[in-house]
Image (tube, rainbow, N blue to C red):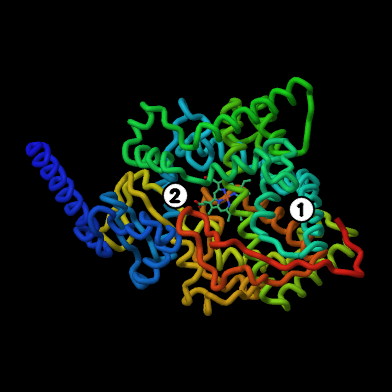
Amino acid sequence: MESIMVLFIIALSLIYVYFKKSYNYWSGMGVPQLSPSFPFGDMASVIFRKQNMGDKIKEIYEKMKGHRYVGLYFFSRSAFLPLDPVLIKDILSKDFQHFHDRGIYYDEKNDPLSAHLFSIAGPKWKRLRAKLTPAFSPGKLKYMFGTIVECGHQMISKLNEIAEEDGEVEIKEILARYTTDVIGSCAFGLECNCMRDQNAEFRFMGKRAFTQTVGDVMKMVIIRSFPPLARILRLGVFSGSVTSFFNRVVRETLEYREKNNISRQDFLQLLIQLRKDGQLDEEMSNDKHTIGTKLTIEEAAAQAFIFFLAGFETTSTTISFALFEMAQNQSIQERAREEVTRLFDKHEGLTYDAVMEMSYVDTILFETMRKYPPAPVFLRKCTKTYKITNTEVHIKEGQSVLIPCYGLHRDPEYFPNPDTFDPERFSAENKSKIWDYTYMPFGDGPRNCIGMRFAMIQAKIALSIILKNLDFTLSKKTKLPLTMEKKGIILAPIGGLWLELSTIRGQSTYL
Ligand code: HEM
């Protein structure tokens, strides 16, 4: 027993010495750092769920403002945090060839669903990105417009019912069902019926994919710390039930459509075309990265899956925060309603052209994503050692890099009175005054968000239908000031966002 104790103390001491030594990595290179402590480095508050990652990195950004960059530690592992927008531009765009990866674990062989556009890197990513980009072209989005509007109809009929009852609603949940229905029908070709059926399988799986059980946390520790062991143990990134559900849904729908020669206006149809022809028509016929390589069924499933994961929560929180801000600011709400009414009258209803002309609603969404960026931090991994200009500092190959989007968006140097919601910052007149690489809700550079236009259309359809049909104020149930969930990556308010809805009488409504 005694000898086990001695061995344990020796092992612990060695680990302690190793960690302590690791904590000199950045200072040894002349990179400013905080005061990391054993064993969590700079992340104790995140590990103990006192703070979410977005808030933590924003806090560090504010504390270290004035430096071009900061060195961080996650346990004993180092991470690099650039603060200067010019350096961020170099990393994301100018010197992209050094940073084309995110460093996210995937295992194409044992867990093909994990090998999607968000996680893969190098030439494989480049080829897939080129193949998928045309699926988000204005022409293809116009083609899906009717499918999204149909989900909007279901949402407003639900909200109208609520308005007729007591009018009180937790809007984030309704919008998560709306965006799940949208992506379910656009990426998976299904009518998920989440709006009516709160236990719909799709909504359940969406929630499950974003919830971490103790088992999931332990799995992630192995995946992050010992990727080769994770591959040997065939550990999947998501729970087995989530993986098999999405694999089954895509396989069955693809096979059904191919066998019965059914065509529908959605992403899945485009993925079917990529499976058959390897390319999406003439738009890309000259691109050497795409010719001759067809998508396998597993690859198609993985892409539909990431469209769902990357799209539903980010978009629904954005719409919810926009409604939250408008509920507190009636003049902004009225001005948006006037724009929507004018454009519905001009275009005789909710058409693609009406949505494209909604410039004031655009500014509301841009300002919402400034104040509440759904992805407050995003990632790069250094793929080739990189020397930072005008310094002797080298970012080594394999180094994780974090981009502090939330910190930049709330920095008074770039956005005066940053806590004030002011859509005018994004008016045609003011937009050009925003400094490059200080506003990045969709990331930036070649690896930015591929779904940006789709997200904006989906959000504008929801906002315009709501504004046209309903008046809304903040319910007393919303806890102010908002505090964000302590876990998870996406900013989400604790207790939800509660609104009081009332029907607008005496107006013809367009659905
Ligand atoms: C308001 C809604 C959304 C926000 C704020 C958002 C934000 C982001 C951000 C910050 C990134 C990382 C960018 C970077 O690293 O530079 C990203 C990547 C990505 N997003 Fe979105 N996103 C949204 C909606 C969507 C939707 C609707 C889809 C799909 C239908 C989507 C699909 C993706 C994919 C596939 C990537 C990875 C792109 C690549 O690595 O090539 N996103 N998104």
Q: Nearer the viewer, mark 1 or mark 2?
A: 1
Residue furthest front as drawn: 1
When asked about the image quadrant of residue 315, the answer is bottom right
Q: Position of residue 470 (x, y in %)?
A: 80, 66
Residue 378 to residue 66: above or below: above
Left or right of 100 on screen, residue 127: right
What SS does tag 2 mark? Answer: helix
- Circle 1: residue type: Met
Left or right of 76 on screen, residue 149: right
What SS does tag 1 mark? Answer: helix
Residue underneath mark 2: 96
- Circle 2: residue type: Phe
Q: Position of residue 287 (x, y in %)?
A: 60, 36
| Quarter occupied by the N terminus | top left
When asked about the image quadrant of residue 479, the answer is bottom right
Tell me the crowding category of disc 2: few under 14, some 14 to 19, or many 20 or more residues within 10 angstroms, Cα based: some
Residue furthest top as drawn: 259
Q: Position of residue 253 (x, y in %)?
A: 70, 28
Q: Going 57% across and 34% down the picture, which residue do you hit?
A: 302
Q: Going 46% across and 39% down the picture, which residue do you hit?
A: 121
Tell me the crowding category of disc 1: few under 14, some 14 to 19, or many 20 or more residues within 10 angstroms, Cα based: many
Q: Nearer the viewer, residue 193 or 375?
A: 193
Q: Going 72% across and 77% down the picture, which residue do you hit?
A: 330
Can I make out residue 428 in this image? Answer: no
User: Sequence order check: which comes first, mark 1 or mark 2?
Assistant: 2
Residue underneath mark 1: 155
| Distance from the alpha carbon under mark 1 to that under mark 2 | 41 Å
Can I make out residue 421 in this image? Answer: yes
